[in-house]
Amino acid sequence: MSLYDDKYLSIANDILENGYFDNNRTGMPTYKLPHQIMQFNLEKEFPILTTKFVAFKTAVKELLWIFKDQSNSVKDLQAQNVKIWDEWMMDDGTIGTSYGWVVKKFNQIDKLIDALRNNPQDRRMMLNLWQIPYLDGGALYPCCFLTMWDVTDGKLNCMLVQRSGDWPLGVPFNTSQYAVLVHLLAQVTGLRPGLFTHVVNNAHIYKNQVEGMKIQLTRKNNGYNAPKLWINPEIKDFYNFTADDIKLEDYQHHEAIKMEVSV
């Protein structure tokens, strides 16, 4: 079984057994645990669940929409048959001053790439989507809002901080897509992928997701080995990546589990 399945399901079981049950903004109560942490060595394994299907290609398209295209247009995603932002689309067809808009506003990707190439021991390398003056102008406060970057011995390390994590649906998606981001940035800066640490401040399972999560937990001893990530080695400019340049090889998985998204 993949290391990700093992760590992820252990925390899922802990949330169900020991989580604090209460209401929240959505009106659908959750079981929650604070400060959950998973860490992976990306040279050894790509972190994606095998105990259920994760829509990897959709995750990659959203990742590129945020950090490469730096777009806030939901219609841009819809044109790629990605509908995950439909529920939050504002009247103008965007998500307002959030995610990709903030990346572009502060030229964050170019500044990070420049630091990785020219000042790799800089201790201020971050992508920060939590820009207070622009939070209320967005359709949703960013969940994965901060990445902090480090270069050690030629390896690119990343810590992702997520303020709120829907454990059954959002977290597996986010882990895989930000692990991809580490690989992409490592390739264009001449580094090797290193440690990826995923910190979730509020890790929760909604009440209407419990049965689905229990189904996944029954598969714990029947997971598969982690797949391999393939990235087109010809791409040296971050802005030239497309979804077709990023693929999983030998992704074996159990079937998807239908669970509800709380808006």
Image (spheres, rainbow, N blue to C red):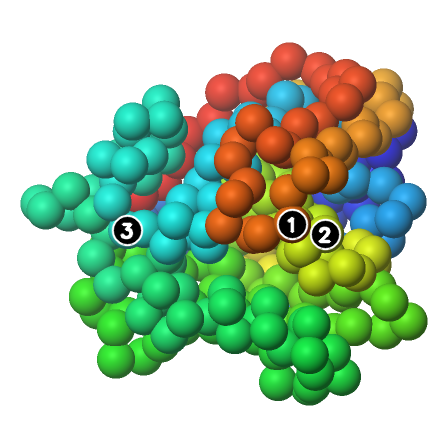
Identify residue type, mark 3.
Answer: Asn
Mark-to-mark CA distance, 3 and 1: 25 Å
Q: Are marks 2 and 1 in contact (CB under 8 Å)?
A: yes
Q: Which mark is residue 37?
A: none
Instruction: Measure the alpha-carbon separation of dots 2 and 1.
Output: 7 Å
Mark on residue 187?
Answer: 2
Dot 3: within a 10 Å radius of its alpha carbon, few (fewer than 14), some, or many (20 or more) residues? many
For marks 2 and 1 on the same chain, the one whose residue lies earlier in the sequence: 2
- SS state under label 3: loop
Which is more foreground, mark 2 or mark 3? 2
Q: Earlier in the sequence, mark 3 or mark 1?
A: 3
> How busy is the neighbourhood of tag 2: few (under 14 within 10 Å), some, or many (20 plus)?
many
- Residue located 75% across and 34% down the image: 229
Estimate the x, y position of residue 217 in percent, counting from the top left.
Answer: 73, 28
For this view, does 222 lie left or right of residue 21?
Answer: right
* In the depicted structure, whether residue 6 falls above or below residue 237: above
Residue 11 shown left or right of residue 68 in the figure: right
Residue type, numbered disc 1: Lys
As measured in the structure, the alpha-carbon distance from the residue carrying label 2 to the one carrying label 3 is 26 Å
Answer yes or no: do the residues labelled 2 and 3 have beta carbons within 8 Å? no
Residue under label 3, please give it: 72
Q: Which mark is residue 236?
A: 1
Q: Residue furthest left?
A: 91
Q: Is residue 34 visible?
A: no
Q: Residues within 10 Å of mark 1 (few under 14, many from 20)?
A: some
The three-letter code of the residue at mark 2 reads Gln
User: Which x, y percent locates residue 214?
Assistant: 66, 28
Residue at image point 84% right, 64% down: 155
Q: Residue at x 52, y 44 (%)?
A: 240
Q: Are marks 3 and 1 in contact (CB under 8 Å)?
A: no
